[in-house]
Image (cartoon, grey):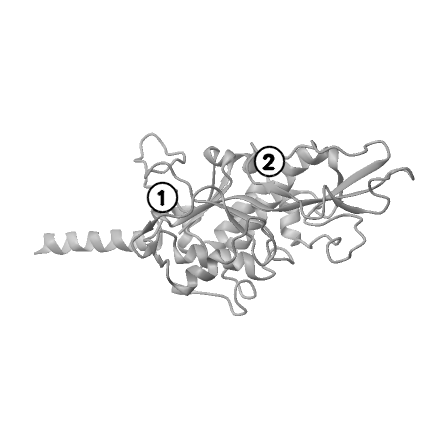
Amino acid sequence: MLGLFALALIFFFVGLLNSLGYNGTTELRKVSKNSQEWKNFLSSFSDNPKRGTPFKWKGSQPQTSGDYVSFDKRLIRSLEYLKNKKTCGWDRPHENLTIDVNSPSQWSSYSVPPDKPVPLSTIRRGVGLRIFQADYIKCTEHPRTDRCTEAPTPKKFPDDSTNFPIPLSSAHLLSPNISYDRVHCQVTCGIDYHPLLLDPSDSLPPGYDEKIKSIVKFDPAVPFDYENITPMSRKAGLLKSVLISYELMHIDDPGCETPDGSSGYDKAIPITLILPNWIRAELGDGWDKMIAMAKNQFPFNFQASSPLAALSSDPVLNVLGVHFNY
């Protein structure tokens, strides 16, 4: 009897650890494909993402099984938080979030120590996702001399509808390959805004939390020349990766997702947040600030006690973007 009781106790604690995420994931909370929740979420997808409809799938959509979609309800909640309003970290909702749920295998593709078993893919199971692109670099063409006939007054570049999605992957940087009159005209770009544009609704840079600017070590409001868009797309990707991480880690704070914050079973912070290794390398001692933040924000002492939960980095994500899962 004592042996059976001890065995039952072991199973109980293993189940408890799983439910709390000590193994880096929790059980899938499926959503019905016919539910209003799922339909409302899908209505926020667009081929040309913008504020209000910022989402786009990178490749395939989540798998379905019968009436259910393998896409966790908590993922929907966190993405709606990023979409709906000015979230903690900056003063605007996101304009573009390209979501990647492609997983060729049932097993995780992330790095695993040689002495550890390869876990199931959280992407494949539907409790995780990657963000491949976030928001835009926007550019304005304006006169360099009085012979700039293409843009005698400042105008959006390359046209009124095209912006440049910010890559969170180090392998998809932007290039200054669109032609214009480089002798008489100039193109100036900004992260999330059109510099020098006469329309004030789109010419003001967003405001970022000072903690984020101290981590990335540059001012996102400073405009730059279009010819420098390649290195600046990398810096913009760094900024957006840190911003999304900050937003997700603070989702339960009062004034972020809800006025009073969330606690207990209602907490929405992910179990695991993994950034590409290039982000960690680029941040330098800024990574230590991220880890210190994670220690304060993740519950159950995850950052110190679980190698599969809380904040980490992985080289596999260098070409994939930012990962988080429940």
The local secondary structure at tag 2 comes to helix
Rendered residue at 86%/39% (across/down): 149
Q: Are marks 2 and 1 in contact (CB under 8 Å)?
A: no
Please tell me the numbered disc located at residue 194.
none
Where does the image place residue 224, in percent across and percent down from the top left? 75, 40
Taking 12 as reference, is 279 above or below it? above
Where does the image place residue 72, in percent across and percent down from the top left? 38, 54
Where does the image place residue 268, in percent across and percent down from the top left? 45, 59
Q: Residue furthest right?
A: 146
Rendered residue at 42%/63% (across/down): 37
Residue depth check, mark 2 versus mark 1: number of the one nearer the observer? 1
Mark 2–mark 1 Cα distance, whole angstroms, equals 29 Å
- Quadrant assignment, res 256: bottom right
Disc 2 residue type (three-letter): Glu
Viewer-proximal residue among 233 and 262:
233
The local secondary structure at tag 1 comes to helix
Q: Which residue is identified by label 1?
A: 124
Q: Which residue is identified by label 2?
A: 282
Mark nearer the N terminus (2 vs 1)? 1
Where does the image place residue 63, in percent across and percent down from the top left? 36, 47
Disc 1 residue type (three-letter): Arg
Crowding at label 1, few (<14), some or many (≥20) Cα neighbours within 10 Å?
A: many
- Quadrant assignment, res 185: top right
